[in-house]
Amino acid sequence: MTGAIWNLLLGLAWVMLSGDFSGLNLLVGLVFGYISLVLIEPQLASLKGYPARVPRIIGFVGFFLKELIQANLRVAFDVLTPPWHMRPGVIAMPLNAKTEMEITMVANLISLTPGTLSLDVSDDRKVLYIHAMFLDDEEGLRRNLKEMEHRALELFR
């Protein structure tokens, strides 16, 4: 978290010193701030791991947007075509997430994707129950959800 704050401060300092208060200039400042933090990371223990986390966040955002668009298109196709293709059902997905924050993040990401909804977590916090609109390929759905969980957990660990 310290690295993100420093990166934001360096980006804002860039904007203030250049005198150009635009979003593009802030983005340039954030990139220069990130490069600066990458260079000084070996000397500061508080920045440990920050440079590696930023590419993972960008990769996760791209992955999630791709999943979101695919799910929206699938639901829209099913709604707009006369014969319904959905086969709803509930599956149990074993969780690799351990903490409350990780479980909440995974459950919310699954619920944000159209066609899936997190229903409940088992009492021992090891299984997440998910309602899916399209349960044609249960193993494929489980693989996609596990991939989403894996990528989300990479952001925290």
Image (cartoon, grey):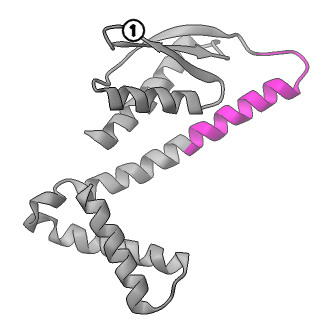
Lateral position of residue 57 relative to residue 3, left or right? right
Position of 22 relative to 117 (above/below)? below
Magenta: main secondary structure equals: helix
Query: For residue 54: magenta?
Result: no
Query: For residue 66: magenta?
Result: yes
According to the picture, the residue beneath numbered tag 1 turns out to be 122
Task: Where is residue 85? Give x, y as percent.
Answer: 78, 16
Lateral position of residue 3 relative to residue 146, left or right? left
Secondary structure found at label 1? loop
Magenta extent? 65-85
Q: Quadrant of the C terminus?
A: top left
Q: Residue at x 66, y 17 (%)?
A: 134
Task: Where is residue 68? Give x, y as percent.
Answer: 61, 38
Q: Residue at x 41, y 28 (%)?
A: 104
The image quadrant of residue 137 is top right
- Pick the front one: 59 or 2: 2
Q: Residue at x 65, y 12 (%)?
A: 136
Around disc 1, counting alpha carbons within 10 Å, would you say few (fewer than 14), some (14 to 19), or many (20 or more)?
few
> Which amino acid, by three-letter code, is at mark 1?
Ser
The image quadrant of residue 18 is bottom left
